[in-house]
Amino acid sequence: MYTQSMDTMGKDGDASPASAQPALRSAEDLQRQERFDARIDGGDFIEAKDWMPDDYRKTLLRQISQHAHSEIVGMLPEGNWVTRAPTLKRKAILLAKIQDEGGHGLYLYAAAETLGSSRDQLLDALHTGKAKYSSIFNYPTLTWADIGTIGWLVDGAAIMNQVPICRCSYAPYARAMIRVCREESFHQRQGYDSLLVMMQNGTAAQKAMVQDAVNRWWWPCLMMFGPHDADSTHSEQSMRWGIKRISNDDLRQKFVDATVQQAQVLGVTLPDPDLKWNEERQHFDFGTIAWDEFWRVVGGDGPCNSERLAMRVKAWDDGAWVRDAALAYAAKQHTEQQAA
Ligand code: 3HC
């Protein structure tokens, strides 16, 4: 079965060059660690060539590569609708958005490579099912309204999660995220606009189609933020290192609070009978997330896990001749330059 279970980089002699660090630490290492901690505490950014603890490097590699995989796997559910977009304008917007997601994957793979892993190693982890990608992309896109809903809710959730990463302590990741977030804003707005057109000018059937899409995507979107803080393996350490700035639960709450009013303007109902304003907390209360479903999808047993992974592997295999040709051309040019 295709799985999303992760072997963290560094185990089994894999990607992290720092995995060879000795278990016993020298006085010099301890001094480096102290300097690193002081820089983190002082809000300093860490660059690729700076010394960093092995676990910091591994955590970043895990998160950034998972993020990169999410971007490129995230192209698939939407790619499914390019040929069926209802107008030329919507088709052009959708194509541009999907292309952006591919670009985000490339920025993020490049950021991950600065930590010492190769692109091939990162992609191999995805293709062999060892690396995770976001649970959300294992759900199907059944109607055109799913495309608008992905823009509004999935990209909306992604922005909520990713804006704080622009202040991540690892500078190459933070820099990549600034551009990614700008583009994600366009993605969110085009999705909302597409739904608004259907809700304001559409037929009863089109309005029902939008509501149905929102019903199916709402809960998986809340799952995108990860498990509750109490069940999150990495949050505490990642927050101490300034990799994560806001916790999973706090981001999820911010997303719910921001989205309720947008749903009202749109004229759709969010599928949660427990969703209501809590005057005391000054936040919306919401119902219980189906965590068994979340862990099933993360574990490889979601509606589209095997299909998504098979498509990525096929794209990689089909592109082998392009990579071979590019390498052969580069080698030829190198030989010619040497001879000149
Ligand atoms: N899907 C799949 N796995 C998830 C997950 C999700 N939605 N949420 C958490 N997990 C996994 C974690 O990877 C971890 O497993 P691991 O130890 O095997 O890696 C486990 O569940 C426990 O979760 P933690 O809270 O301890 O994990 P993190 O501290 O890494 O937090 C995260 C999870 C909030 C997703 C964090 O990694 C993060 O902010 N990542 C960067 C953003 C990102 O990857 N977003 C993915 C969506 S990208 C996107 O949406 C594209 C856009 O174009 C729409």
Image: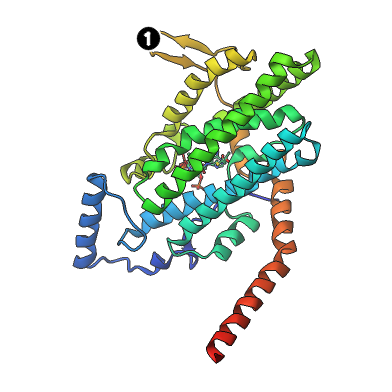
In this picture, residue 153 sits left or right of residue 231: right
Q: Is residue 36 above or below residue 165?
A: below
Choose between 35 and 75: the one closer to the eye. Answer: 75
Q: Is residue 127 visible?
A: yes
Q: Is 217 placed above or below 300 here?
A: above
Q: Residue furthest top?
A: 279
| Residue at 69% across, 54% down | 312
Residue 197 point in image, percent of width and height = 69, 20
- Percent coordinates x, y for residue 74 in the rendering: 63, 43
Q: Is residue 13 above or below residue 2?
A: below
Mark 1 burial class by Cα count in 10 Å: few <14, some 14-19, many 20+: few
| Amino acid type at image mark 1 | Glu
Label 1 sits on a secondary structure element that is loop
Residue 186: give x, y in percent of width and height. Answer: 56, 34
Looking at the picture, the colour scheme in use is rainbow
Judge whether residue 225 can be spotted in this image. Answer: no
| Quadrant location, the C terminus | bottom right
Identify the residue at the far front of this view: 340
Write the residue at 56% across / 25% down.
Answer: 289
Residue named by callout 1: 280
Instruction: Give the residue drawn at x 46%, y 49%.
Output: 176
